[in-house]
Amino acid sequence: MKNRWLLKLFTCMLGWILLPVLANTQLAVAEKSVDGSENLPDSNLASNVAIDTCCHETALSQKAFLNHPFRFFKPDSLAAQKKRILAMAGMHGGLYGGSLLVLNQAWYANYPRGKFHTFNDFPEWQQIDKVGHIWSAYQLSRASFPGWRWAGLPEKKQILMAGLSGFAFLTVVEILDGFSKEWGWSWGDFGANIAGSGLFIGQQLGWKEQRISFKFSFHRMQYPETMLNERSDDLYGASLPQRMLKDYNGQTYWLSANIKSFLPDTKLPGWLNLSVGYGAQGMFGGTVNIWDNPQTNILINRTDITRSRQWYLAPDIDFTKIKTNKKWVRSLFYVLNAFKMPAPTMVLSRGKLRFHGFYF
């Protein structure tokens, strides 16, 4: 179960890391045209220029143009638009198809398959895995969006195609689950995929920007008992990358709201966010803390350990609001905005409020 989630999350991460970087390579021509280092396009092309902004699509001043995270010239003809659409479709198809092929061969091929069926895993892991599905769908949709903008689709179609791109990929993974005898189609996962893509689509349609980002953070857990550390190594893996992707006890997911987007007259910096996080601890099994010792085959009962939900409040940074003229920095910031930055944090758990001077 845990290794399967590792592979699923890895393929999702591969998608949202590569897509914005590949799409942002199209910015070089636009930058040269605007900063004066080269002549502007001919009048026919210039008349069709539409510079994307997070609030509206219209011609901006040179300063605003240079500071926007993603900015593209629209294709100068219907033929050029079709080529870009085909290029984006091919990029999505190749990346997603290749990821699913690797996932199928690396995991599903090792387990028996049968008729399509469902199973209910919603009670497991304090629903942290479901929140992970929301985050994955949201980030895949967000990563896909700049590419569909570059393709020159109408604004609403850009948004819908981006949202469907994230949702469709994760739904295909869920179908593979449905044909595996070890698992099955999870309506909880399916609903979480819809929620993640819906979070992106709703904000982009309503506000023309992502005022509320959905972010991820992780810290490695260390326990005072050797038994618990051994159980964690067996269940989640011993290395830091394995723990980061598989250990639900150390994962936190954040809704991070940009303050200036909601309060434009504030004197606060435009990159400052306020974030609310959710996590859980004390989980050494899907639903209960009972397991077999792999060395002795003795049943271990640790139901004395409380499985608790955690709620967090902390400041954050919206990297896409930091102005820069470097396209590679904008690409980096766009990727970094999937993660919550370490910061002083208030934690509410089991009715008690605590404060961390530095939390990730």
Image (tube, rainbow, N blue to C red):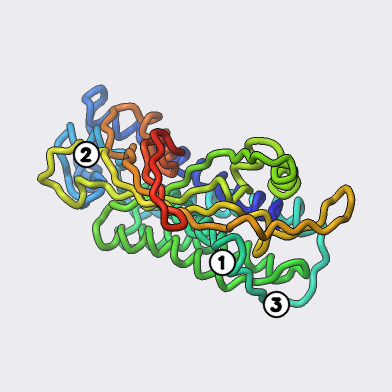
Which residue of the protein is positioned furthest toward the top in this rendering? 37
Identify which amino acid the numbered label 2 is placed on: Gly
Tell me the number on the disc at residue 270: 2
* Residue 173 in the figure: left or right of residue 150: right
Nearest the eye: 4 or 274: 274
Disc with the residue nearer the chain's start (2 vs 1): 1
Instruction: Determine which of the numbered discs, if any, sits on residue 259 in the image.
Output: none
Query: Closest to the observer: 195 or 24?
Result: 195
Pick whichever, 236 or 55, lies toward us: 236
Question: For the point 41% across and 34% down, which residue is it?
Answer: 358
Q: Secondary structure at mark 1?
A: helix
- Which residue occupies the foreground of this view, 140 or 42? 140
Image coordinates for residue 139, horizontal then vertical, percent: 46, 51
Q: Is residue 97 visible?
A: no
Q: Earlier in the sequence, mark 3 or mark 2?
A: 3
- The extreme right residue here reads 296
Q: Position of residue 48 (x, y in %)?
A: 23, 48
Give the alpha-carbon distance from disc 1 to disc 3, as whole Å. 14 Å
